[in-house]
Amino acid sequence: MRSGNLGYPRIGKGREWKKALELYWAGKLEEETFQAEMKAIRLRNLKTQQERGIDVIPVGDFTYYDHVLDTAAMFGLVPERFQYEGGVPSLAVYYAMARGSREATACEMTKWFNTNYHYIVPELDNISPVLTHNRLLDAYREAKAELNIEGRPVLVGPYTFLKLSKGYAPEQLAVWIDRLLPLYGQVLRELEAEGVQWVQIDEPILATTLASEELDHVARIYDRLTKEAPGIKLQLQTYFEAVDHYEAVVSLPVHGIGLDFVHDGGRNLQALGKYGFPEDKVLGAGVIDGRGIWRADLQDKLDLLAVIGQAVSADRLIVQPSNSLLHVPVSAAQEGALAPVLREALAFADEKLEELALLTKAARSGAEAVASELAASKRSREALQQSPARSRKEVHARIADLASQPSSRAGDLEVRREVQQKRWNLPLLPTTTIGSFPQTPEVRSARLKWRKGEWSESQYEAFIKDQIKIWIDVQSELGLDVFVHGEFERNDMVEFFGEKLDGFAFTANGWVQSYGSRCVKPPIIYGDVEFTSPMTVAETVYAQSLTATPVKGMLTGPVTILNWSFVRDDKPREEVAYQIALALRDELEALEAAGIGMIQVDEPAIREGLPLKREQWPHYLDWAVRAFRVSTSTVKNETQIHTHMCYCEFHDMIDSIRAMDADVISIETSRSHGELIESFEEHTYDKGIGLGVYDIHSPRVPSVEEMASMIDRALRVLSPEQFWINPDCGLKTRKYEETVASLRNMVQATLQAREKY
Ligand code: GLN
Ligand code: ZN
C-alpha cells in the first residue's frame, strides 16, 4: 500500500504566493524575480510532501492563477479579444484572461464544482487549439532535477475541461473532443518519452449527475488516450461525490481510478462492495477528508481501508485525500494561539499528509505500529465533543422548538410593497450598491493597528466613523437612492460575524485560495452558535444619522456563513444553519428596533452549497431557504428585506429564490456576459430585482453607454417598476477613483433610462 496526494495548496505557509502575484501585477516585481519566487514556492510545496513521506507526489498542480486557465493556455485557447498571436501565451495575456485589461474584459469566472474555489471559464468560440507548451513536462523535470522526486503529473481531463468550457453548441461536443484528443495525446507522448510512468487525470465531472450517453464520450476519450501513449499509466481521478455510473467508470480503459470515500454519502463504498473493482487497476482510495479541517478518526479510517481492502489488494491501493488539498489551509502547526482543545482536533494540509503516512504505515506494519497516534487522534476528537462550547442549553432548546419559530413574513408581497413604497417613495429604477466600499491600504492598516493594540478602541471607532462619513458624502454627491455604510469595519463578510457570535474560532493562518490571488480565511464553527450582542447596529445607525436617504443594514446570511466556514462534523449542516439563522434574527430585530428600515441579508454562497447530485438539490434548497426565512421573517411589513447573490445561474433555482421572499434581490450579471438576463425570458419574477450593470472584478471603468445598454437589455425582460440599478457586487477590492468614476457613470446611465421608461 502506498500513500498519495492529489494536489497541494499553492499559496504557501505565509501566503507568499499571493503576495508575489500582487507585487508582480502592481509592477513592483520584475518578471525574473517573480518567476524565481514562484519556483521557490513550488519547490517548497513539493519538499513538504516529500518530507512527510508521501509516495505519490503530484506535479503540475501548481499554478500562476488557476489550473483550468493553465489548461486553456496550454492549448492556445485564448479568445480573440486578447490579441494573442500564437506561441506560448505570455504572462500578460495569461493575466489579462484572468483579470481583464484596459482593452479586454476578463474571461468569466465561476465556482469549481461545489467549492468556494473559482476557475476561469475557457471560451472556445472560433479558436483552433494547438499545444503551445507542455507545462507538465516542465513540472516533472523540475521536480526530478531539483528534488529527485518522481512526480505524477496532474492534468484536467478532456471531458471535465470541455464540460466546464463555453462557446460551443452542445452538438459540437464530439467535435471538440476530437480536436482536443490529439493535443492531450501529444502531452502524454512527450511525458512518455521523458520516462513518466503515471499521470493523474482529473475528471471530477464524473461525480456529477451525467446521462448514461455521456459515458460513451468518456469511454471514447480514454480508449484513445491509452492508445496515444501506451507507456503511460493513467490514474483517472474523481472527487467531491460518488461516481454515478460506477460500473462504467471503473471499467474505463485506464490503469487506475481514484474515488472519494468521504463525500460520497457511502455510495462509492456500496458500489465497490456490490460490483467489486477490476483486478488490473489501482484504486486511489480518498479516505482522508480533503475539504474539512478536522483530524480524522484514524481507527475509523483503518476500518474503512479494511473494507476497501476486501475488494482491492494492498499492492493496488493508494491511500489519499478525497480531493486536492488546495481546498484546505497549509499547516495547523501555526495555530498556537487557539485553545488547545480545538487546536488538537485540527488537521490542515500538512497534518493530513501525516495522517496519510500514518495510515499507510499502519496498513503495512499493523495498527500496533501506530498505536499511540491512534489513541491521540481519538482523545482529541472526544475532548472537543465534550467541551462546553458544544453544550449551550439555550441553543439546543431553540433548535428543538424550531417548528414553532416563524419562517414567513406577516404580510404578503403586495402588502409589503405598498407600505414600503409609501415609506421610501423611491424613484423609478432606484440606484444602490451592494455594501462594501474600497478597503484601501489605509483602512487595512488602521485595522491592523487596532488589532495589534497600537490603536485604542475609540481611536479605531473614530477612524471607521470618518470613513463612513466620507462615503455617505460621496454617495450623496453621486445621487444614489439607497446608501450603505461601506463595511469598513469588516475584514471579511463572514469572519466579521463569526467573531461576534459564540461558537466560532479563528485561525491565524488558515488561508485558502478563493480565486486568483484572493484567499479567504474561513472561520471554524466548532461549537453551538449563539447571538451575544448587536454586531452591526452602531455603524449602521451612525451612517443613517448623517443622511435622510435610507441606509441599508448589511448582514451576511446564515447559508453563506455556513458555506464559507469550516463546519463541525458532528451535526448535520442544516442544524448548524438554523443555529446561525436564529442568531441573525436577533440582529435583524436589533437593527429594526434602532430605526433601520432596509436590511440586506447577503447569500452569495447559497448556490455553491448545492449538492453535485441533482436528486439532492430539493432537500438542500429546502433547508437553505428556510434558514434564510427564519432570519428575515420577524421584521415588520414596512421593513424592506434585500438579499444579494453572486455568480448565480438563476434559471435552475428560481423557485427557491422566489421562496426566499426577499423584497429586493441583487444578482451579479455582467461577468457571465448577460446570460442571466436571458433566463428571464422564460421565467417570471415579481419582486424587486437588480441585475448588476457592471463587473466589479476589473479595474476598468465602464462607460455610460455600456451600462445603459445593460439596463436596456434587462428591461426587455423585467419591468422598470421592479428593477434596481447596482454594480455586480461589493466594491471592497476596487480603488477610490475607479469606484467613484464607475458609480458616476452608473447614475448617469440610470438618469438616461428614467427618461426613456
Ligand atoms: N455586502 C457584501 C459586499 O458588498 C457582499 C459581498 C459578496 O457578495 N460577496 O462586500
Ligand atoms: Zn456578490
Image (tube, rainbow, N blue to C red):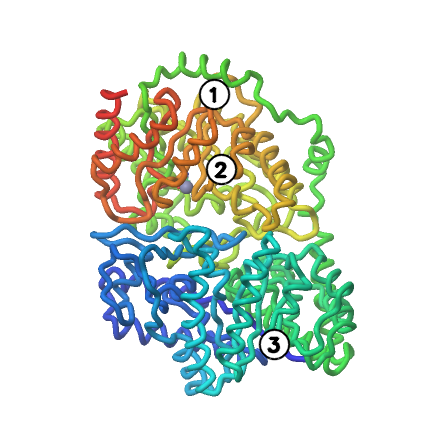
Q: Answer few, some or many: residues within 10 Å of disc 3's Cα (few below 14, many 20 plus, some between 14 and 19).
A: many
Q: Quadrant of ligand 2?
A: top left
Location of residue 315 (image quadrant) = bottom right
Q: Nearer the viewer, residue 255 or 62?
A: 255
Give the alpha-carbon distance from disc 3 to disc 2, as whole Å. 39 Å
Q: Secondary structure at mark 1?
A: loop
The three-letter code of the residue at mark 2 reads His
Question: What number is the disc on residue 255?
Answer: 3
Q: Secondary structure at mark 3?
A: loop
Say whether residue 291 is visible: yes
Q: Which residue is mark 1?
A: 639
Say whether residue 263 is visible: no
Residue for point 40% across, 30% down: 540
Q: Answer few, some or many: residues within 10 Å of disc 2's Cα (few below 14, many 20 plus, some between 14 and 19).
A: some
Q: Answer few, some or many: residues within 10 Å of disc 1's Cα (few below 14, many 20 plus, some between 14 and 19).
A: many
Residue for point 48% across, 66% down: 156
Estimate the x, y position of residue 737 in percent, counting from the top left: 21, 43
Location of residue 354 (image quadrant) = bottom right
Estimate the x, y position of residue 48 in percent, counting from the top left: 51, 76
Q: Nearer the viewer, mark 2 or mark 1?
A: 2
Residue 702 higher or lower than 29, as above or below: above
Give the alpha-carbon distance from disc 1 to disc 3, as whole Å. 61 Å
Q: Which residue is mark 2?
A: 651
Q: Is mark 3 within 8 Å of ligand 1?
A: no
Estimate the x, y position of residue 44 in percent, counting from the top left: 44, 76
Q: Left or right: 345 with respect to 511? A: right
N-term-proximal mark, 2 vs 1: 1
